């Protein structure tokens, strides 16, 4: 599980790769849930929150970039 500090240190490219991996894991967990093979139901919540953290950092960086371009 990544902390917010670790997420902030990563590059945008790494964050997008992590986001893709997390989305894949979320999809796999959904399939496991439907087929009743999901052992750790708490993992669904953890993955969902990790996705939100990564998206939050990416959108904050995007807003900073827009603000810098507008100020220039």
Image (cartoon, rainbow, N blue to C red):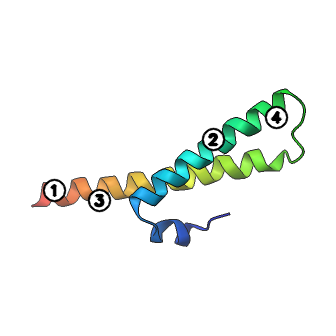
C-alpha distance separating marks 1 and 2: 34 Å
Residue at image x 72%, y 37%? 28
Query: For mark 4, what is the residue?
Result: 32
C-alpha distance separating marks 4 and 3: 38 Å
Determine the secondary structure under disc 4: helix
63, 19: nearer the viewer: 19
Q: Earlier in the sequence, mark 4 or mark 1?
A: 4
Q: Earlier in the sequence, mark 2 or mark 4?
A: 2
Query: For mark 3, what is the residue?
Result: 64
Residue at image x 50%, y 52%? 17
C-alpha distance separating marks 4 and 1: 45 Å
The quarter in which the C terminus is drawn is bottom left
Disc number placed over residue 69 in the picture, else none: 1
Is 71 left, or right, of 4 in this rendering? left
Q: Earlier in the sequence, mark 3 or mark 2?
A: 2
The quarter in which the N terminus is drawn is bottom right
CB contact under 8 Å: marks 2 and 4: no
C-alpha distance separating marks 3 and 2: 28 Å
Mark in the foreground, 4 or 3:
4
Q: Earlier in the sequence, mark 1 or mark 2?
A: 2
Determine the secondary structure under disc 1: helix
Q: Earlier in the sequence, mark 4 or mark 3?
A: 4
Query: For mark 2, what is the residue?
Result: 24
C-alpha distance separating marks 1 and 3: 9 Å
Determine the secondary structure under disc 2: helix
Determine the secondary structure under disc 3: helix
Residue at image x 46%, y 71%? 9
Instruction: Give x and y (percent) for residue 4.
Output: 56, 67
> Within 10 angstroms of label 3, few (less than 14), some, or many (20 or more) residues?
few
């Amino acid at each position: 599980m990544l902390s917010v500090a670790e997420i902030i240190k990563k590059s945008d490219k790494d964050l997008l790769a992590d986001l893709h991996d997390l989305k894949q894991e979320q999809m796999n967990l959904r399939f496991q849930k439907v087929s009743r093979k999901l052992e750790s139901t708490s993992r669904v919540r953890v993955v969902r929150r990790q996705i939100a953290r990564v998206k939050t950092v990416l959108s904050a960086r995007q807003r900073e970039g827009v603000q810098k371009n507008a100020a220039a």
